[in-house]
Image (cartoon, rainbow, N blue to C red):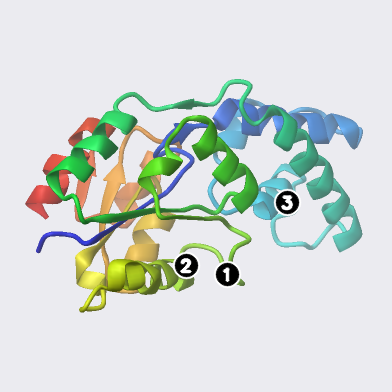
Amino acid sequence: MVPRLLVFDLDGTLIDSQIDLANSINAMLVHLGKPELPHAVLLGYIGDGATMLVRRALGDPEGDVHDEEYVNKALEFFLAYYRVHKLDFTYVYDGVAEALASIREAWPGIAMAVLTNKPVNPSREICAHFGLDRYFFQIYGGNSFHTKKPDPAGLLTLMAEASALGGAEEAITAAATVMIGDSEVDILTARNCGARSIGCSYGLSPQSLAAVVPDAIVDSASEWLAALQQL
């Protein structure tokens, strides 16, 4: 089936943002009087949203050690610092813009969107900075809904919104939807509503793909179109 909706993850799929995220977390830790953490450690904490990233960096992912006021202050500092430094080292992966253009050329009527667990405002600002936003009818972040990926609420919302674009006569089904991302979170998001998925082995969490087995795996963005045509 030719896909009608493509939904992309952001960090690790469209952009490499790990240095700016890690630097912002370490700035937060220094602000709190704590030692910095190696980037390799922090890389493993990315993917489940800003609050969980902060909690993991504080050594308190389950909320058992620090009170909520402390975590909220840490989160507030992290977000404020990241807002200023989000584009210091972040870049678009090779071939992403060309791949998006090729997909649009192959299927002019296809709808494309971003669904990330990163907060929505920096997500939209980053996409706009790099000119990626012109390909997407919508960009949603981890604070756009009451839940985050892998809960499928965001993906289901995008399916409904894409169905309404241009007055489509037939609703876009899960079978006509493909989620593209670099981690098990993205693959499970697709699976949780019956959509198909493509895993990106070049991203921030490719090791997690082995546990969930996406419908296809690509080694670069330039392989997206071919993978989609073979689904």
Q: Amino acid at mark 3?
A: Arg
Name the residue at the bottom extreme.
170
Q: Secondary structure at mark 2?
A: helix
Which part of the image, by quadrant, shows the N terminus?
A: bottom left
Where's residue 115, x and y in %?
46, 55
Q: What number is the disc on residue 55? A: 3
- Residue for badge 2: 154
| Label 3 vs 2, first from the N-terminus | 3
Reading the image, the residue beneath label 1 is 147
Ranked by sequence position, the earlier of labels 1 and 3 is 3
Q: Residues within 10 Å of mark 3 (few under 14, many from 20)?
A: many
Answer with left or right where residue 24 lies relative to residue 123. right
Q: Quadrant of residue 142?
A: bottom right
User: Is 107 situated above or below 14?
Assistant: below
Q: Are marks 1 and 2 in contact (CB under 8 Å)?
A: yes
SS of the residue at dot 1?
A: loop
Q: Secondary structure at mark 3?
A: helix
* Residue 199 pos. (x, y %): 29, 47
- Residue at 81% across, 35% down: 28
Relative placement, left or right, of 195 versus 2 is right
Name the one closer to the observer, 120 or 32.
120
Q: Residue type at mark 1?
A: Thr
User: How far is the residue under mark 1 from the one under mark 3?
Assistant: 17 Å
Q: Nearer the viewer, mark 1 or mark 2?
A: 2
Q: In the picture provided, is 128 more to the left or to the right than 112?
A: right
Above or below: residue 4 compared with residue 73: below
Badge 1 density bin: few <14, some 14–19, many ≥20, Cα 10 Å: few
Q: Residue at point 64% right, 48% down? A: 121
